[in-house]
Image (cartoon, coloured by chain):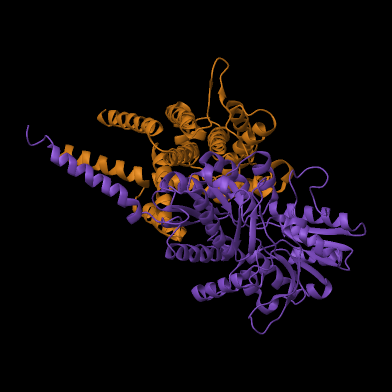
Amino acid sequence: MKKTKMSRRDFMKAGLLTTAAAALGPVAFKPTGLWAATPNLKGPIKVGYQAVLSGTLAGYGAFHNMGVILATEEINAAGGIAGVKLEVEFRDSTLAAPEAIKNARYFVDSWGADFLGGIDSSGQALALAPVMAELDRVLMVTHAATEKLTEEHVFKKGIKQVFRICTPTYQDSNAAAFVAKDLPVKTWSTISPKYEYGYTCWEMFKNTLTKFRSDVSFIADSWAPFGTTDFRAHINTILDAKPQGFYSTEWAGELISMVKQANQAGFFEKVKHVMFPVGAAMDVLEGCGPELPDNVWISGRYFFLYPDDRRNNDWVARFRKRWDHYPAYVSETAYSTFYAFKKAVEESGSKDTAKVIQALEGMTFESPAGKRVFRKEDHQAMYNVPWGLTVSNPKYPFKVMGKQIVIPAGECFNRPPFEGPGTKPPF
Amino acid sequence: MVHRYLTYGLYGAMAAVLIGIGLFSGRFMLYMTMKVMILAIFAMGYNLLLGRTGLLSFGHAAFYAAGAYGLGLVSLHLSSHPLLGIFAGLAAAFVMALVIGFFCVRHTEIYFAMLTLAFGMMVFSLIWNLRSITGGDDGLVGIMRAPLDLGFFSIPLRKANHYYFFVLFFFLLSIFLIHRIRQSSFGLILAGIHENDRRIEFAGISLRNYRLAAFVISGVFAGLAGTLGTLLESNTAPFSAHWSYSAQPVLVSLIGGIHTFAGPMVGGLIFIVLREIIERFTHNWMLWFGIILLVIIMGFRGGVVGALSGFAKQKKTASTEI
């Protein structure tokens, strides 16, 4: 009986100790600064990231991964996100929609991810959007570009969990039309991927360009299925039509194959004005090397020479030091994704999905690609990426952008509510 | 007799475990278990043709996709009632299996396999190219799981743990039906065709009709798997009609054992769980997955179930001899 009963003195001691601990605790153990008022943030912040790591387009996944690892290392070395450690798991999305869904479910339901990132193909992004509503985690899309993701799923259906940090098809087609309107070309043609992304870009390019000029016509199109390695039949179809201009949203390994085979067919001598909306990807520039002709219009979701400011140049230098590569655009979007999450968590003081969404909506943040703003209505990041003409530069073992034209995102991105007059450029 | 009770006991235990999973586990476990059950339905139906009748088809993904797109199109354009969608999917798979089967069952062995492969790839390119109907490479997206409206009451299916029991119901129903089919005189004739088709023909039985019937039945089960898979993932993918997808029930049946009833179920479990485990260790999962499958298929003669039950029988006969 005596043993178990606490004497009055013990009780006092315990009380004093508790009070002292409570008073000292926050000072001794809690971080100070921005997140000082966030006692409810527990455990590591987990981000599940997926991109393509197998097949002919696997080059992209490797560049995603470089950006992811660099961001994780830098954030953790600087004390993590709101004082807690950042943990990342990276999975192969194989570019198939069922795989992307399975990965997302694994990340959230089995591994316990707080945020998701990645996704290369538009088909995957569209299939994943309703799943994100069910899983209720923020997904930051870093590469898939279809405007339907943000216009229909986020804006119309209200799936607030989906954000996109990269430029969408507006950059590939609307901005391309802004460039194309000043070219001496009346007949356009395309070889593009035979899926959502390819169709939607060509459609948008045609619509926007026709608004600028009534004298252009679109005389040939050839659609290459996913996994095409032999483009000769497609190239011949285009050459037979004798167009003045050529526009192609082929990407990664497939674009490299197409450029090489087009060279052999003398394509670039016959068609003078060529536009590759995702030609400024690093794996394409490195993969084509000198075989990519000069004076081809290229763009992307980021180009490492733009903007030419200290933040970007420092980042490119750090990236090169770590990986001995120049950053591809997916490296930048992957890297910046983590800083977007960091800022949103630290501002909202929580990793709770609803609060993070609130913080991300309309949030402005600095990234290597420049200032980004997440548009509140459709969760699309607004920032500028140049279109440029390829040129040889002895400083680089591949072609880079020479002459650059920047069409501001505010001018060439569709605007909410996405239907009716005044929602599609030119404004 | 003892062996029979043991089998019933094992099935009872399996049902109990599956119900337990449905009641107590998290979303990811539910999701993976549903994937296993759907693959098992696909493979068990398929094995009626491969293991029982002795016909190797490389085009069954076409029927899986017929089920998937049948359900998808009905639920997007007509009515999202799940049973109506499943019925439409089964009807589509039935008609397609009847037409394709009509041409294929005239041949056997490699000719049969190549014909089914060709027809399967035809279906795949149709789905791939009819973009305005099937969505092309992107498939049909945004297929929602509407509540199961039975007139006097309705059961919501949106949540994983509700839909789980829906899948479980069809899984157990499929086991029951396939078991009945195998034990029926029809099923015994199929086995006879496998053993010695000349004899069956001499008995005055139309080989072609029986092969066609087996083909259609297995096609309809593939269609059922397709409808359930589509409701689970809420989208369809054109690659579900590709020959590489047709290889899945073949592999799964081989892993489990094509001459056993439970083989395809066990094979499905191994196929999905193994891949999930390997993916957690390495990005190079395809290589390791391939190596381990090779070892299983070469190491266990007659599949995992076949080898284990053979081992059990051997032990029993050894003990009775003593």
Residue B245 shown left or right of residue B138 in the figure: left
List x then y, in percent, for residue A32.
42, 56
Q: Camera-side residue: B220 or A91?
A: A91
Chain A appears what colour? purple
List x then y, in percent, for residue B172.
44, 29
Residue furthest right in the image = A215
Q: Is residue B10 visible?
A: yes
Residue furthest left in the image = A2
Occupied quadrant, residue A224: bottom right
Residue B94 shown left or right of residue A185 in the figure: left
Q: Is residue B221 above or below residue B306?
A: above
Q: Camera-side residue: A123 or A336?
A: A336
List x then y, in percent, for residue B138.
65, 48
List x then y, in percent, for residue B268.
43, 43
Q: Which chain is orange?
A: B
Residue furthest top in the image = B152
Residue B265 shown left or right of residue A223 in the figure: left
Q: Is residue A56 visible?
A: no
What is the quadrant of the N terminus of chain A in the image? top left
Q: Residue at x 57, y 66 (%)?
A: A59
Q: Camera-side residue: A129 or B247?
A: A129
Occupied quadrant, residue A77: bottom left
Q: How many marks?
A: 0
